[in-house]
Amino acid sequence: MWQSSPPGSIYDYIRVASFSIGPDGLIEQWSSRAAGLFGMSSTEAIGRDPVEAFMPAELRSGGHRRVGEILDGKEWTGLVPFRMPGEGGAHGVAEVYVMPSLTGRGERAALCIVVDVRALRSIETDLAASQAIFGQSPFGFVLFGMDFAVVRANQRFATVFGGAADDHRGRTVEDYLPRAEADRLSATLKRVLETGESVTDLQLVGTTPGGTERRHWSMNLYRVHSGAGRPVGIAGLATDVTRRHIAAREAASARRNLALLNEASARIGNSLDLETTARELLDVAVPGFCDLATVDLYQGLLTGEEAAPGSWGPAHREPAGGSAELRRVAHASAVSDALPPAVAGSGTPGPDDLPPALGSVHRFPFGSPCAMALRSGRVEDVPGDEMGFVQSTLAVPMVAHDTVVGLVQFSRTKGSEPFGERDRALATELAARAAVCIDNARLYRREHERALILQRSLLPPGDPEAAGLDIACRYLPGNTATEVGGDWFDVIELPGHRTALVVGDVMGRGLRAAVAMGELRTAVRTLALLDLEPAEVLSALDEVARGLGSPGGGGERSEGLGGSGGAQWPSRAAQKSREADLSEVYLATCVYAVYDPVTRRCTFANAGHLPPAVVEPGRPARLIDVPPGMPLGVGGEPFEEVEVELAENALLTLYTDGLVESRDQPLDEGLDALRAVLTGPQMELEDACDHVLSTLDTRHGEDDIALLMARIQGLPGEAVGDWTLPREPRSVGRARELARTQLVAWDLDDLVDTTELLVSELVTNALRYGEGEIRLRLLRDRTLVCEVWDAGLVQPRRRRARDTDEGGRGLQLVGLLSAAWGSRRTPRGKTVWFELALPDGAPAAELSVEQLLSMY
């Protein structure tokens, strides 16, 4: 029965055509497939010479000879090139089978069958590739038909499920898998066939024929189509992934352990507190690792006893009767009404052998697993209790830097999986991490206490006093965890009842910043006592800071020495690297101000610090325009001075940047906020200090804060005596007379004789060694200060007079009779001064014989 070939038949792929040649050698019949192959319609082809129509010119002579032979009755098969339609004149190759034939009149003709060689070669290649992939693949290939029965399987598939590849034809999924898995695979095959959507990594579980081991397969499924696009089946690629599943289970266990360790790293040791760190360990371990756990730390460690490394745990520290004293600092349980492991760890605790309460101090019995773990530094197994509640316990010593700091016990109750070797390793790691954090917390607490003592010892007392100033000050650490930084303030008494006010900020924080702050503060005090001008103090302090911040303390001068051919200095790169590490600690900003209560004038110099603020009665607060020089330690630029006259009861405020700047508040906004809070009703100085700190954002925890506030209270006019004396000998007597009169007016009669004698000595020296007119000034405040001014630049020098000298003992006398004396430069000369304590009603102390004889 003839029927048309269905779509997708072999003829759709191989491109077969036919035509006939008549007795005259011309094309007589032309098929539709020939028209498609050669691109020529029957109208164009019939009646033409096939050789002239299709063959290249260089092959036509041979073609005519071959056609003649065919018409003589000879068959022929061969490859014939031809011009392909629509491809720019390109040549194709056709396999032609020519069969002689006879017409109805008995004439010789020929029937030609033509096949496109390119299509045949493509089919051969595809078949070979398909066979190679299907037959040689190391994976199991299977092809399901439209009825989901196996149409074809490769040898790899047959190796897994037994028999030869052909034996699997006609089998269904129920022949390979258990019912539940077979139903799941059948449903998946149906879905792939209906939707055409492929499925990857379908996980199937079963056993191989005759086997009992549980196997895992991964299967990829996709729909297969004919050349016309018609679905013809479903292809499957199956891979045995049993080993992968085993490795995945092991990897999942390892991941859980790593996740636990990662959580421990993130959560343990955030507080630098011993007890909190112990609780953080148990928060990680319970219930993720065990059902209940306890932590015991050595009592000596908690009380801050200083001990040699390793002395917390080894046997020489353990008393003969048991372990050293420990305190239970943490306990956690994931089971309600659970008791922690017994102290002895050897059976049911009796009435006198109950687990220690949280916070109690106890000892482990000498032979107990816990005591053995502390002595040996190794994990010990603690037997479960006879009551059947605890299944197993690990006693894990907490070892940090070869030092045992305590013991942690991990317990699992009945019904939980017992501890294995991996659990022991994980428990050891958890305890070690917590131990390092606890030991770091111990070391931090010790170093922090030392740094805090150092820093507080370097700050001035809480209520510093100064002539003509009411002072209040505050220091706030950046956060309560560190409390140590580089901010400082100072109040330094200068001659003439003047006062130096200092606020500085060393870059960085911690112990090194505190040490740098102490060094700079000491240098400031030393330079201030030389009575230098503020700009000169900062210039000298800048040299000190550069020396502190350079390798060897030599500053930049060491570079010059390095090229002199002397000692071998480090390479330039190494020196710069080390300078980068050290100099940052010693970069600092500073404001240095000198206040004179007589004139109420204050001279400022600034080294990269924020400007001081002042608020005068009835006026808004303002920032004093002091040129901001370079920070200390940078060098290269001179510092400028600004002199400002302050009104009575004005409020002067010096501060560090932590008061006005934070991550959430720009500096300009902080300065505006400071001016706003200072501009307000006048209040007591201590209250004003607290008001500033409570109003501004001072709890950001990013930087330390130093605040120094001073209320201006100038010396009253009646507390100052000021006279100018001509440069003549009688001025000495005049000076004594003026001093006597002023002291009597101040009711300081007890100081008249001493003051007359010392004033006489200073004025005499000014006449003898000085220049220009002489100025005498007496100041009364908490002490009596006498100053003698002249235009000479030569500073007085105390010396020991020889037995034959008639003079030279005046300054020795000044030094013996006064509480303090000294000399300082002024813009127009010098000032020599002495200071006397005000009488308190007790008789004045007389000079000893040794003191009197020392002048001779």
Image (cartoon, rainbow, N blue to C red):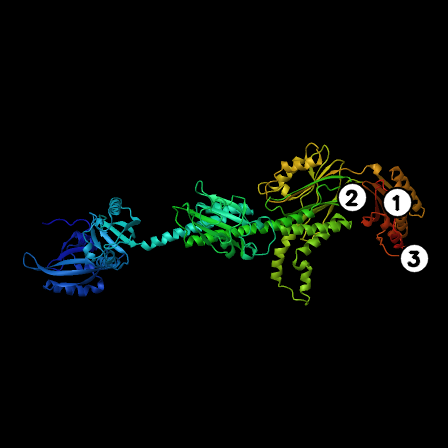
Secondary structure type for disc 1: helix
Mark 3 = which residue?
805
Q: Marks 1 and 2, Cα distance to the nearest angstrom?
A: 21 Å
**Contact between labelled residues 2 and 1, with CB atoms less than 8 Å apart:** no
Q: Quadrant of residue 27?
A: bottom left
Mark 2 = which residue?
498
Mark 1 = which residue?
755
Of the pair 328 and 29, the residue shown nearer to us: 328
Tell me which amino acid carries mark 1: Thr
User: Taking 65 as reference, is 819 left or right?
Assistant: right
Residue found at the very far front of the displayed protein: 351
In this view, the mark in front (1 or 2): 1
Tell me which amino acid carries mark 2: Arg
Tell me which amino acid carries mark 3: Asp
Of the pair 23 and 579, the residue shown nearer to us: 579
Q: Which residue is drawn at 14% across and 56% down?
A: 19
Of the pair 413 and 779, the residue shown nearer to us: 413
Residue found at the very far right of the displayed protein: 730
Q: Marks 3 and 1, Cα distance to the nearest angstrom?
A: 24 Å
**Contact between labelled residues 3 and 2, with CB atoms less than 8 Å apart:** no
Report x, y in % for residue 611: 68, 43
